[in-house]
Image (cartoon, grey):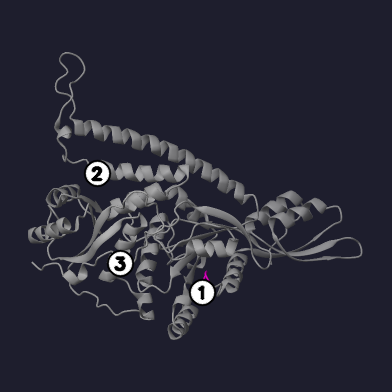
Amino acid sequence: MRSVDPNKLKSGSKDTPQKGKGLDTRLAPTRAMVLCPILRRAAPRPSTGPSPASLAAETRDDHARLAEAVGLAHAIGLDVANSGTVPVARPQPGTLFGRGKVEELKGIIAAEGVELVIVDHALAPVQQRNLEKAWKAKVLDRTGLILEIFGERAQTREGRLQVELAHLTYQKSRLVRSWTHLERQRGGVGFLGGPGETQIEADRRALQEKIVRIRRELDQVKRTRALHREGRKRVPYPTVALVGYTNAGKSTLFNALTGAAVEAKDQLFATLDPTMREVSLPQGTKVILSDTVGFISNLPTNLIAAFRATLEEVLEADLILHVRDISSDESGAQRDDVEHVLKELGVDTATDDNRVLEIWNKIDLLDAEDAVEVRNMAARKGALCVSAVTGTGMEALCAMIEDRLNDKAKLVTLTLEPDEGALMSWLHDNAHVLDTRTDEYGSTTIELRISREKLERFNRRRGGAPVAAE
């Protein structure tokens, strides 16, 4: 059994970036240790360092995984005293780590005064319980950590409901016999009621009742969102949704396009609740831009289910902008993670690529040579390189959004008589008018782009011979 490499356990006070600074520090932050279990692979991918070749990476570098886990810990203001990768040759059903490794880590945890150990891996309830007993510290796995972050960041009533549902679903699976009160039994009804249900059964039933109640409330939220979407369909504004890995720069890009003030930090899950704003593009096309929650690798399935109502905005979007942090060595793996979640939601980028546009953000963080190589690669793949901070590529992005949306609209030329002023006004409100010409008799010839659905509505309003698209 290999021991933990001391060089891989880094002190948070010296070697780990303090991304948690700026959070509420009125109480002393919890002292934590982050462990990234590395299950041995047949052929581990060597670390190659920063390179545009990483854009095509399909697996994650071990140290990048650790850095992300530490970033998640800092996202909720934890004081990361130590962090390191831990090789696991053979996962143990009771503790995940081997006995010798558990004892070795126990000594480090005690010496550093660690109160919370974060294991960047899914832990079974019995594994979590056994590790807590062995280390005399609270243990949190990756799912629990992400849920803690979401619980702290959710601001809207809908967001809090979604997080609470995910928390309860996760907690229900954690009801193992960790405490003595769960072994007690309560008496049944009447004199001959028998021993009744155990406390663990009562707790599980109470959790299930809460889950059912929250799901009913979220169903109401879903119906309300559907009504809002139907309302937006009655106006000519298409919807553009920003999706991407957390910290890819979606909120910064959203602010640059809309002039909004959505919180944007160099921090994982800096924003959680979705935001929508109206944007006017250069040629006059108006769109509704939606900023959604960031994705992450190994996103808990119960969290995806809980946020499905919010992410339905992505399903209904006319255009999806997949924002990628192109300066990250893990950009390729992050792309795969996002596409995996999109596919679970019903958006298959392989078959629906005309609806998804890749935006390679943070191009300003690359050196000149790498930037040229990345731009050439983007041109071959139909992506666009931008910097939401410096504004590089923003004009081209707006033009490309407009072109993609206009490709879905039909080019129509029609003539309206002087007494059809109401129809003229309706067209200006529901289509993209390109040109108008009025002759000496007062008749107006209009050239415009309009969706097939709106064109059918126009024909019904006008009556007579239907207008056909060119």
Distance from disc 3 to disc 2, alpha carbons, whole Å, reads 33 Å
Q: Residues within 10 Å of mark 3 (few under 14, many from 20)?
A: some
Q: Is residue 177 visible?
A: yes
Give coordinates of residue 323: x percent, y percent: 47, 66
Kindly give the residue lying farthest to the top in the view shown.
191
What amino acid type is highlighted by mark number 2?
Answer: Ser
Rendered view: 33 above or below 331: above
Type of secondary structure dominating the magenta stretch: loop
Disc 1 marks which amino acid?
Leu
- Identify the residue under disc 2: 173
Q: Quadrant of the N terminus?
A: bottom left
Q: Crowding near pointer 1: few (<14 within 10 Å), some, many (20+)?
A: many
Q: Quadrant of the C terminus?
A: bottom right
Q: Secondary structure at mark 3?
A: loop
- Which is in the foreground here, disc 3 or disc 2? 3
Residue located beneath label 1 in the image: 384
Give, as a three-letter code, the residue at label 3. Thr
**First in sequence: mark 3 vs mark 2:** 3
Q: Identify the mark nearer the N-term, 2 or 1.
A: 2
Q: Residue furthest bottom?
A: 369
Any magenta on residue 387? yes
Look at the image and give the residue range highlighted in magenta. Answer: 382-389
At mark 2, the secondary structure is helix
- Secondary structure under the numbered disc 1 in the rendered image: strand
Q: With 285 as the anchor, is 110 left or right in this view?
A: left
Q: Quadrant of residue 398?
A: bottom right
- Residue 448 is inside the magenta segment: no
Query: Upstream in the sequence, badge 3 or badge 1?
Result: 3
Q: Are marks 2 and 1 in contact (CB under 8 Å)?
A: no
| Mark identifier at residue 16 | 3
